[in-house]
Structures are given as structure tokens and as C-alpha cells.
Amino acid sequence: MAETAHNELRVRLVTPDQVFIDGTASAVELPSRSGCLEALYGHTPLLTELGAGEVRLHGGSVGEQRYFVAWGFAEVLPDRVTILAESVVAPNAIDVVAAQQQLERGQKLWNEAGAESKLYREANRVQQEAEARLASAAGK
């Protein structure tokens, strides 16, 4: 793992198959299920469930980087952030056509859900991920 300078976080971004980031950053923005959050050196310990959206890294050895993540968990400690995501992709590698098809599938699921709250939740999850993918690909 990279050495950390004063006021930098050690950052690891991983999936079950690959390590994407193992370095330092001065700030990390995360898409938690309850909203976006930013971790800085000295942050209060936190464990959060990830939603779908961008992880943005600033400064340190990793420089300025963005990655689209979908679901997982993040552990924030005063001196490090560990992000365990189901999937990670660079915004320029997002398949926009597939994301648009995913959005349409989510809208179809929504329309067919009827009185089933479980189906509505799944439709919302599919649509949220597709919308976040499209926004990331567009640089928003």
C-alpha cells in the first residue's frame, strides 16, 4: 500500500475480482444509499451501503479520478477509505446503449409492478443504476 502524507487518506477501491485503486487521496466522494458524502482525513468512522453513482478521488498519489460504482459498501476511517463495490467502470468505458436499455427495462418493470412493493423497489433500483450510469458517461 502507498505511503500516506500528512492529511491524506489511504484509499482502496475494489471489486470481488480486481483492485482498481490502492493509493492516497486528500478527499473521496462516495455515492451512499442515503446520499453523497465526502471523506477527508480525520473523518468520523462510518460504514455505509453504496448506491449507484460516481466515486471521485482528489489529490494524493491517485490525482483526480472518477469511477462509476454500483452497489456495495464503503468503510471510512480517520486515515483510510475502503470501497467494496459490486462493479466499477471508468465513465468513458460505460456502454451508453446498454444503460439506455437498462433504463427502459426499469421503466417497464415499474409499469408492470402492479401492487407488488418488492417489484417497485427492484424497478427503482434498476432505473437508479441506469440513470447514474448515463449521468456518469455524460460527465455530470
Image (cartoon, helix red, strand yellow):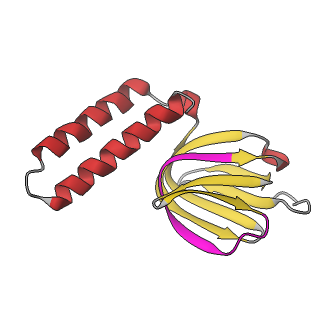
Measured from the top left, where is residue 33 in percent x and y? Answer: 45, 59
Query: Residue at the spot x=12%, y=58% of the render?
Result: 116
Horizontal and vertical percent for residue 69? 52, 47
* Highlighted magenta segment, given as a residue range: 41-56
Q: How many marks?
A: 0
When the figure is inspected, residue 62 is found, relative to residue 12, above or below; the finding is: above
Query: x, y (%) of residue 74?
Result: 58, 64
Quadrant holding the C terminus: top right
In the image, is residue 59 part of the stretch drawn in magenta? no
Which quadrant would residue 106 be assigned to in this image?
Answer: top left
Tell me if 64 is positioned left or right of 71 in this view: right
Q: Would you say the magenta stretch is mainly helix, strand or loop?
A: strand
Q: Is 53 covered by the magenta stretch?
A: yes
Residue drawn at (72%, 58%) of the image: 11
Residue at horizontal 87 percent and vertical 62 percent from the top: 7
- Where residue 35 appears, as percent x and y from the top left, is 50, 57
